[in-house]
Image: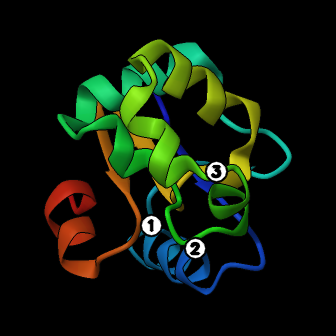
Amino acid sequence: MSITYYGYPKCGTCRKAKKWLEMNELDFQEVNIAENPPAEKELKEMIAASSLDIKKFFNVSGKKYRELNLKDRLPNMTDEEKISLLASDGMLIKRPIVFGHGKVTVGFKEEEFDTVWAN
């Protein structure tokens, strides 16, 4: 199984994460999260591997999140509805996401990448 990096080219945090992956010579497949968001099945795998609440996968500072009033709507949604919503629009997903080998990181913190992805 390989590593998949979901990022958005215009996102500075995503560029930092990609640079970290390259500098640490990790072999990864790059996917533009806006054009090709992860499918529901993959999102379920990511969420399970992360042990994070589904809410942590939402880009809470994003324009789309605010437009859809998700701060108020999410508490009343089922996990299936949340996952379906995330899969429908990559701009709703917190980025970058790096997933592979049963591991996942959401967002970019260098110390977390050092712990999770460094060989």
Looking at the image, is mark 1 or mark 2 nearer the viewer? 2
Q: Which residue is mark 3?
A: 92
Q: Nearer the viewer, residue 85 or 32?
A: 85
**Label 2 crowd (10 A; few <14 / some 14-19 / many >=20):** many
Which residue is identified by label 2?
A: 14
Residue 44 spot, x, y in % from top left: 42, 19
Residue 42 on image: x %, y %: 52, 21
Amino acid type indicated by mark 3:
Leu
Q: CA distance from mark 1 to mark 3?
A: 29 Å
Cα–Cα gap, marks 3 and 2:
15 Å
How far separated are the C-alphas under marks 1 and 2?
17 Å
Going from the N terminus, do you reach mark 1 or mark 3 first?
A: 1
Query: Mark 3, mark 2: which one is toward the viewer?
Result: 3
The figure's colour scheme reads rainbow
How far from the left and from the top, in percent, is residue 45? Answer: 39, 20
Tell me if I can see residue 27 in this picture.
Answer: no
**Amino acid type assigned to the residue bearing label 1 in the image:** Glu
Query: Looking at the image, which residue is at 65% across and 22% down?
Result: 39
Residue 70's label in the rendered image is none
